[in-house]
Amino acid sequence: MSVLTNPAAVTRIVPAVVFDVKRPQRMIERSAFVYRRSWMILVSGFFEPLFYLLSIRIGLSALIGDVETGGRLVPYDEFVAPGLMAASAMNGAVFDSTMNVFFKIKHSRLYDAVLATPLSAGDVAVGEITFAVIRGALYSTAFMLTMWALGMVSSPWIVLSVPACVLIGFAFASLGMALTTYMRSWEDFEYVPALTLPLFLFSATFYPLSQYGDFAWAVQFSPLYHGVELVRAANLGEWDVSILAHAGVLVALTIVGTVIAARRIERLLLT
Amino acid sequence: MSTPAAIRVFARDWTYFKRIWKSVLIGSVLQPMMYLLGVGLGVGSLVDRGADSAELLGGVSYAAFYATAVIATTAMFVAGQEALWPTMDGFSWSYAYRAQTSTPIEPTDVALGLMLHYGLRSLLSTAGVVVVLTFFADTRNPGLLLTLPVGVLTGWAFAMPFAAWTATRETDSSFPAIMRFGIIPMFLFGGAFYPVEQLPDWLEPVAWITPLWHGIELCRGAVLGGLGGGMAVVHLAALIGFVTAGLVAASVTFTKRLRV
């Protein structure tokens, strides 16, 4: 019997926590209150991509000159900026959903306290992911404005880079949260950069796909690559049907990550 | 003669290190390798196509130019971070240094023991990079051996002042700012990715006073040549100056923090 004809089967695929979302805004409110006291952390996070952009503009652009992407030549800094924008959306989402969530589960026991109130496990999952995405969207907007101010933008379509980064944020936040539920101790977090650094370096971020030669097919397996392609298309203002495929990959990863994370969190918290 | 107190402090770190070396290996060996491949070879192939890039890089390939700097940047990252969070643990979280100094061990012995620990961590991770550099013809030469002590000095030039600072802090709230506004800008603007001559005129002198630039220039000079004896002495003196000042400062702040 298919899922469509049997409503009960839906709950077996989509975990129960998604159905008992009542007050996720209370979770978001709590995060907002916390960050009101440590806004410096929020603000300083924006400088890192700025330093990267400036450094590449000053040094590597002069060494490299123009690069071919999407069938036209663009200056190297204009090529690399969308890659860095996508990567910083990934890094922000991963940090928020691994280190921060682990601390709240194991040390501050925040979620245990939350569940002692009328809030549900679903509220925790939806509220936390939403706040991470809001935070990511703020960073992406700041990043886009910086690119624009430094003259690295070549099309007004660049405004679509922010929703593209939100999509990247959703995918990596849900995958990161799923991964965190399997972490045993802080030492396990050494393995997180072992996963994200190769994605950062080898997702056609720093040089076009053609440079990978015979290994170009392998780059397709990087979730970040699909995000980079979306942001780069926004910057060039050139869209074709492949965009749907790139966005589709990120949506699919978000669904897989959320389902695993919600199931595991429910089990971790309620038993 | 009994074992020097600093060695006893170091022995504790070594015991712990033997338990967690696998996850450490990823941070200090695997990550630099990925940078070597991703930036050195990948971006390098774009750079080497440039008409006047060979001239800007002093006649060497970009992979060789960048890879020699990775020795120093790795030492900076590994030893610098070791002097922040893990050292804070000994002061504020596990109270290990408090326990050590309740024995005949003095606060200065703790600082010296940690110095041995930072030195070993720098040596192991730079050695990992050096081994990889022997695989490439451009960087395979006896000068690589000279970069090992330079890596240790560079690591200390960051770790000792940082440890001195850590001893004055109750929480780690200032550490992300040190990374974001100290370490990362040095990594990006300290001459690792391109010669500092390319920086704007006002920024170039800033690079001169960073320990990282001195470490990079020494590593690059040892492997690729092109560094005069006089400048080598200046770079060495600068690094030793940072290490000495850091050790003196650490000795003062450790004593202040740990004296009962």
Image: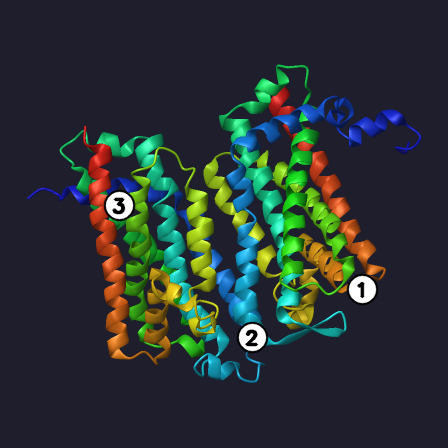
Outermost residue, left side: B1
Decide: few, some or many residues near mark 2? Use Cα within 10 Å; few <14, some 14-19, many ≥20: many
SS at circle 3: helix
Dot 2 corresponds to which residue? A62
Q: How is the image coloured?
A: rainbow
Dot 3 corresponds to which residue? B114
SS at circle 1: loop
Dot 1 corresponds to which residue? A238
| Residue occupying the point 34% across, 36% down | B169
Marks 1/3: CA–CA distance: 55 Å
| Residue occupying the point 52% across, 81% down | B53
To the question of a shared chain for discs 3 and 2, the answer is no
Percent position of residue A13, x then y: 79, 32
| Residue occupying the point 64% across, 38% down | A132
Vertical order, B204 against A139 (above or below): below
Q: Is residue A239 left or right of residue A51?
A: right
Vertical order, A105 against B11 (above or below): above
Q: Amino acid type of disc 2?
A: Ala
SS at circle 2: helix
Percent position of residue A93, x then y: 62, 43
